[in-house]
Image (spheres, helix red, strand yellow):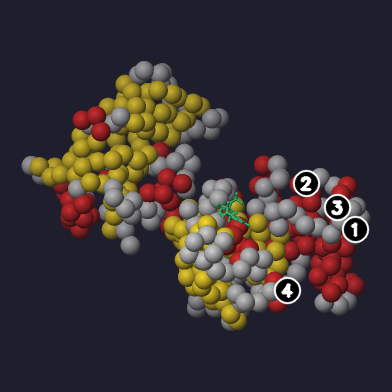
Amino acid sequence: MTAPMQLQLDAVDKFYGPVGLGLHAVKTISMDVSKGDIIALLGSSGCGKTSTLRMIAGFEAVSRGKIRLAGREVQMLPPVKRNVAMAFEGYSLYPTVTVRDNIAFALKALRLPAAEVSKRVNHVSEMLEITDMLDKYPSSISGGQQQRASLARALVRDADLHLLDEPMGQLEPQLRTLLRGRIKHYIKERGLTAILVTHDQTEANALADRIAVMEGGVLQQFASPSEIKDRPANLFTGTFVGEPPMNVFPATVSVTGGALHFDLQGGLDLHYAETAFAPEVRAQMLARRDVVIGVRPYAVHRAAQGARARVVANQWLGDQSHIAASFAGKTIVLVEHDRAPLREGEDIAVEIRPDDLHVFDADTGRALSHGQELAA
Ligand SMILES: Nc1ncnc2c1ncn2[C@@H]1O[C@H](COP(=O)(O)OP(=O)(O)OP(=O)(O)O)[C@@H](O)[C@H]1O
């Protein structure tokens, strides 16, 4: 059974300044979020994540389009009428009351019994490791502690939607890793629906059921982390999500004598038996001719036979080797799990298997195929 729809963005636009003339920060975004889902808005600085979040919360006016939350159209409602809990990037704790009272504020406003308030505040504070600072004032705790207090204040409430703006941006890596798991468990256990804004793909992958990848105000892809990794919708998503980033090379496709060729820059010819690709994938590539091929670094293998590349760097990161090599006028990156005994300047042969190739339209950047599957 599919979960009921909790949030729907229907062709939402944000202009700062006059509609149609001002800065177009969010461009006709549509998105359906099921009840109980955790969604990450992922993108680089200025891509429109925070504007989207603030329109959902009601702190920014929607320039065009509709937002439905828990069955109501809310884009005209003020924030207090939307039943949304938000943890702000700038914390915005009340400075004149203790951390405990900050967290308990919404629960007390609902006149919940004192014992219930105390139980909930203690539980969320333990989860976020802030019990020691409950009796302090916001000005006497660190930025990272204020951030967790703000997160606690949002998560402790019942609401139709929880919005978390860069919720762990100030925390140290170890604490961030620990809290990610706990926060996810807390949200799931309560069946909350949450949207978090982040520019950290590890955080998005670890926390979210689905990731909304944004760039230039446009929703580039809205899918599960594995779908985004295995079937990036376009070149932007393919190269933005994944670490190290996907290797991409412009190529011209042709078939001669039973072989399918990708002519890359610098005269490099990557070729396969024609039958190595499913007929519909082959037909699609040949119809476009000018494509961009992509391969993830861990899918590039060194082999006895293969296309030639020259090592330019070899870094051991403690648990994997990142090897960079010049290839087709660019650099190709390989990831190996063992320490690779390679020196700068050494020639290697690399193998890229047909099943690992992502092919994109050179003009539009749209994905054409992923391995043997046509892109949706
Ligand atoms: N109040 C505002 N007035 C005018 N322009 C704004 C305003 N807020 C944001 N913008 C612009 O809108 C665009 C999107 O900004 P937004 O803050 O939504 O992006 P973001 O992805 O959240 O970035 P960051 O991660 O840096 O917060 C940017 O070009 C930004 O400069």
Q: Residues within 10 Å of mark 3 (few under 14, many from 20)?
A: many
Kind of residue at disc 1: Thr
Q: Which residue is mark 4?
A: 80
Question: Residue 18: percent from the left, percent from the top?
Answer: 54, 64
Kind of residue at disc 4: Val
| Mark 2 or mark 4, earlier in chain | 4
For this orientation, the residue located farthest to the bottom is 71
Q: Which residue is mark 1?
A: 96
Say which element carries label 2: helix
Question: Residue 9: percent from the left, percent from the top?
Answer: 52, 71
Q: Nearer the viewer, residue 340 or 212?
A: 212
* Mark 3 or 4: the one toward you: 4
Kind of residue at disc 2: Gly
Q: Which residue is mark 3?
A: 138
Q: Which residue is mark 2?
A: 143
* Mark 1 or 2: the one toward you: 1
Q: CA distance from mark 1 to mark 4?
A: 21 Å
Question: Is the CB of mark 2 within 8 Å of ligand 1?
Answer: no
Q: CA distance from mark 3 to mark 4?
A: 23 Å
* Mark 1 or 3: the one toward you: 1
Given contact means CB atoms under 8 Å apart, are the residues at marks 1 and 2 in contact? no
Q: Nearer the viewer, residue 11 or 295?
A: 11
Question: Is the CB of mark 1 within 8 Å of ligand 1?
Answer: no
Residue occupying image coordinates x 22% and y 31%? 268
Q: CA distance from mark 2 to mark 4?
A: 26 Å
Q: CA distance from mark 1 to mark 3?
A: 8 Å
| Mark 1 or mark 2, earlier in chain | 1
Residue occupying image coordinates x 51% and y 27%? 316
Quarter of the render that holds ligand 1: bottom right
Say which element carries label 3: helix
Kind of residue at disc 3: Pro
